[in-house]
Image (cartoon, rainbow, N blue to C red):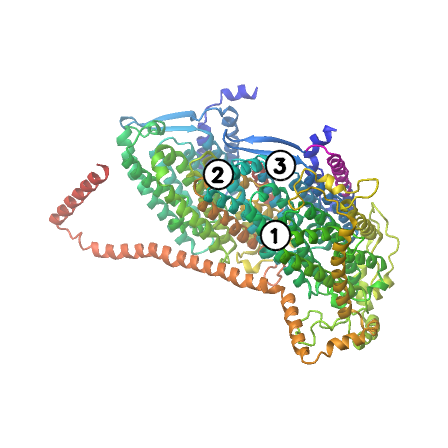
Amino acid sequence: MEYTYKYAWIIPFVPLPVPIAIGLGLLLVPTATKNLRRVWAFPSVFLLSIVMIFSADLAIRQIKGSPIYQYGWSWTIDNDFSLEFGHLIDPLTSIMSILITTVGVMVLIYSDNYMSHDQGYLRFFAYMSFSNASMLGLVTSSNLIQIYIFWELVGMCSYLLIGFWFTRPIAANACQKAFVTNRVGDFGLLLGILGLYWITGSLEFRDLFEIVNNLIDNNNNGVNSLFLTLCASLLFVGAIAKSAQFPLHVWLPDAMEGPTPISALIHAATMVAAGIFLVARLFPLFTSIPYTLNLISLVGIITVLLGATLALAQRDIKRSLAYSTMSQLGYMMLALGMGSYRAALFHLITHAYSKALLFLGSGSVIHSMEPIVGYSPDKSQNMALMGGLTKYIPITKFAFLLGTLSLCGIPPLACFWSKDEILNDSWLYSPIFAILACFTAGLTAFYMFRVYLLTFEGNLNIHFQNYSGKKNSSLYSISIWGKKGTKTIKNLFFFSKMNKKERASLCSKKTYPIDGNVRNMMQPLVTITQFTNKQTLQYPHESDNTMLLSLLALVLLTFFVGYIGIPFDQEGGDFDILSKWLTPSINLLHTNSNNSLDWYEFVTNSFFSVSIAYFGIFIASLLYRPVYSSFQNFDLINSFVKMGPNRIFWDQTINVIYNWSYNRGYIDAFYAITLTRGIGGLAELTHFVDRQVIDGITNGVGVTSFFIGEWIKYIGGGRISSYIFFYLFYVSMFLLISNLLLG
Amino acid sequence: MLEHFCECYSDLSGLILCPVLGSITPLFIPNSRIRPIRWIGLCASLITFLYPPVPRIQFDPSTAKSQFVESLRWLPYENINLYMGIDGLSLFFVILTTFLIPICISVGWSGMRSYGKEYITASLIREFLMIAVFRMLDPLLFYVLPESVLIPMFIIIGVWGSRQRKIKAAYQFFLYTSLGSVFMLLAIPLILLQTGTTDLQISLTTEYSERRQIFLWIASFASFAVKVPMVPVHIWSPEAHVEAPTAGSVILAGILSKLGTHGFLRFSIPMFPEATLRSTPFIYTPSAIAIIYTPSTTSRQIDLKKIIAHSPVAHMNLVTIGMSSPNIQGIGGSIPPMSSHGPVPPALFLCVGVLYDRHKTRLARYYGGSVSTMPNLSTISFSSTLANMSSPGTSSFIGEFLILVGAFQRNSLVATLAALGMILGAAYSLWLYNRAVSGNFKPDFLHKFSDPIGREVSIFIPFLVGGATVR
């Protein structure tokens, strides 16, 4: 059994051959490599599955109560200073590696089909495998320096993947933004590491925790603990950037410019979880410094609320999911800051599966919309153009609905259990935070159902004109989508006419990828059986089997993953696997370590949160229910509308919220103005100093010497007596100076 | 057996002789026969490149003393002799020099249409002088030889530079550097006075009085600070980098900018330890300013080459921070960036050179979407961009990390500022890369395009390999 542990260092290296092989192949034999094409998907899936099995094995051992295992070899530079490299296997590692590999395998299988027509298919798989490798490296690291290295590598992968479609300037800007924002976080992380090394003299986790604890126990002089707090907070800055927490969250919504599988894997399930992972990994350190914990929970609660409000009015289906991710990550941070380690990790797991499901579902939606509305993300991801997709893509709808319900916190699904736990713990921590968190739970339900209803209910609005939403009148606040009955009907009519006209162009658009190359390609997993052009033209079509397979697998996971952490004892078996998994870890709030609540208490607690979620869903369905089915509650709407004098106020409030949300809380604009202009001004200043001051001095010296020369040429007038005078003068000056200087 | 073979080859005069012969031979060939001249130059530089493995194999890493010491009587009555030797530090630089010169010659293979012969000669003379500089164990010659490197460099900028501004750049380069060195010249008689010889190994063991140490330190600092370059006297560096031809920029960034830091490590720090310790703030302050200052200058530049030209300044100032931090992490950490910084900015300069050869413009706004037409170049420039912002996995990372570790223990504020340079560095490198490589291709501006092939790719390969192995 020791072998599994001993060879665990291999985990990050297993997926690595694929990117290396693809890279070399593309460089040396480009045509041959490109012709192989989908053969490359197989090794990447296969290798990642190996890691999955491996880490499942590790996880089972950890659940059974194996000890934490650590191994390192050091790279000594000097006696005082050595860099160690190694791997650490503990419950956290095993949880994260299972998460990464399962979601990773699903996403790889999915993207085999999703990306099959893309030019950069090979590049995509190379990047994906590389990012998986670096992510696995991050979670198995045993010290801070290793964390930092993989942290940066993950950031680099994210840069490459966001900018995958680099020919689009938006994507190019988005990846730059993501990298630089993450670099700000890395700066904090690096400084934190340096400071901690200065204090403790070690980068190894366990030594670090021990030394810090000793320091805090032994001496209580103010400066040292202040510095320690500062360092810990700086470490947290790294987590803020990577997990898209409040001040540095701006990159995450833009990161949706990447292909959808990327958004599912990197920007929902794994990479953004790296920040949570870092805080969880350093949890023993943070617990000994209460200020940092307070900071973490504060940042968490701000992010929870901000993400939820910003998600309210997004038009892009992926952007609203991204803001939802941000909000959910805020929940995890909040839980960590409150000290409920277990709840945070539980939510991490459940959210990862649900959000991956949602993103893959939205990818399937986009895939089905693309042939109809065009291949621009501005159109194919725009929810204003969607609607009524239930008819066309029922399986995707089913999966998406389950994901939505799970995220809203509806009982049998995964996120319910974890979110409920966080909400409960927040009541113990601070009532204000708890109220905010519960309020946001309602908001979550609201915006998730808004997305769901706009996408799948009502009628198809393909020819909705104002999809970019430049207009901003009060009429056009929320109610317009899905409620323009007359317009939709007209649109449908229009659509049928349009189709005949556009058939030729659409046909050519659709058929170009289906040349012999793609048709006869080897399909390692599931063959595509039906590929009818006619259906593609008129209606959104259901995605292919490979994509649905991974969707369904994630549906199963979303259903059942919640059961690993159900907090009450079942008769007979002990059901709470997660607690066993995390036994060695700390839980500050439940000090009596008895996690099992009784049935009654649990129901009363969860009743509250579930009712909030249902309330959010109710409001959403009230506002976004398509017109033909909302006649039943017409009276209710009327009663809302006819509130008399309150009406104007109500409209204004809605408008303010809408504008705030649609303009991303004006935070991006604020950054753009202050930072960009600030740096631009600084650059102008330095350039001025370079050109005018420094160069000016040099040129001034040159000009002066010219004048001096002009002046001095009259001295050399040929008089011997003046020569002698100057000669003596120089000699005496030199002697004087040398005497003074050299003593 | 290899060891045995090397026994009889401990004579390293070939390192010097080979480029000298290579630079003399073309003089006897008529100007019209340019091909054999180029081949002779390339072969001479390649043979020189094969030399350093000999001392590397025989090198004894257990001692800090100079090995393979050779001496030549020069001015015996003043005890001034020509001492040459190699220690661990100079071995790095000798390898770096011999590595870069063949690349320079092949970069100018067909580009240097005018004065082809003189180009080969100048390159080889430069190589010989630089190898001599790094092997020199004598402060006097350490003054003489770097000054002589200026001459071929001045000619290369002035003759083969790309536009009219090159004259100004060449003058600036020459004047600034020689102005700094004047102070060094003042210091040398004083050393001679005190020790009676200019042998470095003897002067290292000499105790100087504190006042004299400070005077000497300031004198040598003035000389080296211009070469590094540190902030108030840095202006020549971007100017010269931009105006020089690609091969010139490669050498300027790859080797000449190391002369200053090499001098610090070889002379200032070991000879005047107390003065160095006391004057740490004087190094820290301008270095920290430079680290913030130069990247922020770049963000308003529109010339691709000028953007890169600022990166050696920032990196070398990080190195000076490291070497003035009095601990093993700082000083030890300052050596790997010097060697890794040998291939990194040159690779970037070569990328820009390739673009310039294609399109004859260096203005950033004309470029965009190069990746769709030049995937190979984009890959190469991406990896060099990563190395330029010292992301982990590239050669620059480990040294810069160590420097920050070392500096943090001495002064956390400086370390913070230096780390802040990391963000700015990433910002401008990525900005450059994104402008040139991603986005839409602009066919209005750029008509011809072809990916680097053959000669150009083969030039880049050693950089990628070198970047990977250098740590």
Q: Nearer the viewer, residue B171 or A319?
A: A319
Is disc 1 on the same chain as disc 2? yes
Most distant residue in the bottom direction: A644
For label 2, count other residues whose C-alpha is less than 10 Å away and answer few (under 14), some (14-19) or many (20+): few
Q: Which residue bears the numbered disc 1?
A: A297
Tell me the residue at 40%/47% (across/down): B285
Label 1, residues with CA under 10 Å away: few <14, some 14-19, many ≥20 = many
Q: Chain of mark 2?
A: A
Dividing the image into 4 quarters, which one contains the C terminus of chain A? Answer: top left
Quarter of the figure with residue A665: bottom right
| CA distance for labels 3 and 1 | 26 Å
Start-end of magenta stretch: A45-67
Q: Earlier in the sequence, mark 3 or mark 2?
A: 3
Q: Is residue A82 above or below residue A266?
A: above
Mark 3 = which residue?
A: A142
Disc 3: which chain?
A
State how far apart marks 2 and 1 are (Cα): 27 Å
Q: Write down the residue under mark 2.
A: A219
From the image, state whether disc 2 or disc 1 is nearer to you: 2
Q: Nearer the viewer, mark 3 or mark 2?
A: 2
- Left or right of residue A647, residue B358 in this image: left
> Is residue A264 something one can see in this rendering?
no
Q: Earlier in the sequence, mark 3 or mark 1?
A: 3
> With respect to residue B97, does A308 lie above or below?
below
Residue A49 belongs to magenta span? yes
In reply to whether residue B201 is colored magenta, the answer given is no
Q: Which amino acid, mark 1? A: Ser
Q: Quadrant of the N terminus of chain A?
A: top right
